């Protein structure tokens, strides 16, 4: 079969790698000049990632590259990031006497850290919590994440797995689950903030999303030497070696249909390419509307609730990254419930936001010129359905971020900035992301698992979807899995002709 994959982001590359040895003719069409999609970089003398920076579940990358017949270790060097994070709290409480909590994936190291913070009881509670997360992951990942669903009722099968989730409090509130283990408010935040990755407040997310904390805080965080874009480059290399073709600078303008099947794709310049199967990985709501203008967008997308967006500041500095920090740092604002209500319910900026600050030159100094550094600062902000006028507010948000970076000691002075790029929701929209959010459709219950927009398009027998707007969802592990699941759908359509 001729399989056309639209997009050379992580989802498309995953699908290509998993199909590379299938015997089908695989071609990836990408509008830009190279692989990566949202895992891109800002060019120049500083190599600055402008997408995801937290790499977990590297075995999913290894699995995809191996499916294409290559070894990941031959293609990219992965560095273990330890600590995975350092957390800072604006309430002034300290950890190790200097306001830090270092989050280690090593269980014993983290137990010792918690013991110094909050005593033996909380340290023992941590061990019980990790055991809970491990059981949750063992049930949830194979049965509810790494799986194709054919109907919403599929969630009930196998019954044993569903009831195991119930016993593990997967359908309780995440905050309640975490609070049942920890009394210390700082620990509750550290092990629940990850719900924001799924577009949810930790106070309202279900306990199943504790699995995200397991992925980074227990299984660990990695960084590819040379920057995050090295991951898609490695996957492209593996796919090419297995015979997958890539056409860059090829924007897909339209899907050409005949009856209930897609006959092929139309590229810019009105070039038509026939295909027996199409896997589309572009942000689905906007691409669906543009590529299938005469088709009604499925209800699950028409009425979807979207995740908040992000204001991203990318700096190249004339000074080295300060060693008091870690590669990844989280600065927690003092308000908690109030912040999520502002962001997710009122569509407003957080008064005292929690901010992720990554300093990748602490791990890989070669990303910047000698003696210089990189700052990646991300603030959760409302998507374009919110109440922020970004044309008038972006400068104020930028200046507030710079003030925070100085106050925290991340940046000595604005004069130290050698290069600057800011990305706000209007910019994400220009990049083809619905409602200006890189985090796509949120993961509230009826937009998760079998209730999320399916990867098998119900309108066309040979149109599949991969990426964050379909199953299993948002984040590098989920997007890699989405490509694998789409590839499984293709292989189920029939053996090599």
Image (cartoon, rainbow, N blue to C red):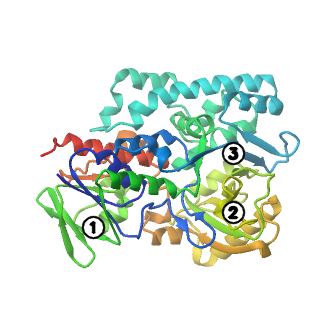
Residue 472 visible in the picture: no
Work out whether residue 179 or residue 471 is closer to the camera in this orientation and state it: 471
Judging depth in this view, the residue of 398 and 466 nearest the camera is 466
* SS state under label 2: strand
* C-alpha distance separating marks 3 and 1: 41 Å
Structural distance between the alpha carbons of marks 2 and 3: 15 Å
Which circle's residue, 3 or 1, is located before the other in the chain?
3
Q: Residue at x 74, y 68 (%)?
A: 402
Query: Mark 2: few, some, or many residues within 10 Å (few <14, many ≥20)?
Result: many
**Disc with the residue nearer the chain's start (2 vs 1):** 1
Q: Which residue in the structure is indicated by mark 2?
A: 375
Q: Quadrant of residue 123?
A: top right
Residue at point 14% right, 55% down? 260
Residue in the image at 52% along x and 71% along y: 427
Residue topped by disc 3: 85
Percent position (x, y) of residue 5? Answer: 29, 57
Q: Are marks 2 and 1 in contact (CB under 8 Å)?
A: no
From the top left corner, tell me how far across and down residue 338 is, in percent.
Answer: 68, 51
Residue hosting label 1: 291
């Amino acid at each position: 079969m001729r399989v056309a994959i639209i997009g050379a982001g992580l989802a498309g590359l995953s699908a290509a790698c998993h199909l590379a040895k299938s015997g089908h003719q695989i071609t990836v069409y990408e509008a830009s000049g190279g692989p990566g999609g949202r895992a891109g970089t800002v060019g120049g003398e500083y190599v600055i990632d402008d997408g995801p920076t937290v790499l977990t579940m590297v075995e999913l990358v290894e699995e995809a590259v191996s499916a294409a017949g290559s070894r990941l270790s031959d293609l990219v060097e992965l560095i273990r990031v330890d600590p995975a994070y350092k957390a800072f709290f604006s309430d002034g409480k300290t950890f190790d006497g200097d306001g830090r909590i270092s989050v280690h994936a090593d269980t014993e190291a983290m137990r010792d850290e918690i013991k110094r913070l909050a005593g033996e009881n909380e340290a023992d509670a941590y061990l019980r919590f990790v055991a809970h997360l491990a059981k949750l992951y063992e049930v949830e990942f194979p049965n509810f994440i790494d799986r194709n669903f054919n109907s919403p009722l599929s969630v009930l099968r196998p019954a044993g797995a569903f009831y195991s989730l119930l016993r593990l409090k997967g359908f309780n509130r995440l905050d309640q689950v975490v609070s049942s283990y920890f009394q210390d408010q700082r620990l509750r935040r550290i092990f629940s903030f990850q719900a924001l990755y799924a577009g949810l407040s930790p106070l309202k997310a279900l306990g199943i999303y504790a699995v995200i904390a397991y992925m980074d805080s227990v299984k660990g965080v990695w960084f590819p030497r040379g920057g995050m874009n090295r991951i898609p480059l490695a996957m492209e290399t593996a796919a090419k070696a297995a015979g997958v073709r890539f056409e860059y600078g090829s924007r897909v303008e339209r899907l050409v249909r005949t009856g209930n099947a897609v006959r092929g794709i139309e590229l810019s310049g009105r070039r038509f390419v026939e295909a027996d199967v199409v896997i589309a990985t572009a942000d689905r709501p906007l691409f669906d509307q543009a590529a299938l203008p005469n088709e009604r967008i499925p209800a699950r997308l028409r009425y979807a609730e979207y995740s908040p967006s992000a204001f991203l500041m990318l700096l190249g500095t004339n000074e080295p990254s300060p060693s008091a920090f870690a590669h990844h740092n989280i600065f927690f604002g003092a308000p908690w419930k109030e912040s999520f209500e502002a962001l997710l319910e009122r569509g407003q900026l957080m008064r005292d936001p929690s901010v992720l600050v990554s300093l990748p030159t602490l791990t890989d100094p070669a990303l910047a010129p000698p003696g210089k550094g990189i700052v990646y600062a991300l603030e959760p902000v409302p998507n374009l359905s919110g109440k922020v006028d970004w044309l008038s507010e972006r400068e104020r948000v930028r200046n507030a971020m710079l003030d925070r970076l100085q106050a925290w000691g991340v940046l000595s002075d604005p004069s130290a900035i050698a290069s600057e790029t800011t990305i706000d929701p209007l910019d994400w929209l220009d990049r083809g992301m619905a409602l200006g959010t890189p985090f796509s459709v949120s993961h509230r219950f009826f937009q998760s698992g079998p209730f999320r927009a399916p990867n098998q398009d119900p309108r066309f027998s040979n149109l599949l979807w991969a990426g964050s707007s379909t199953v299993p969802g948002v984040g590098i592990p989920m997007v890699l899995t989405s490509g694998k699941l789409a590839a499984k759908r293709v292989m189920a359509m029939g053996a090599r002709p």
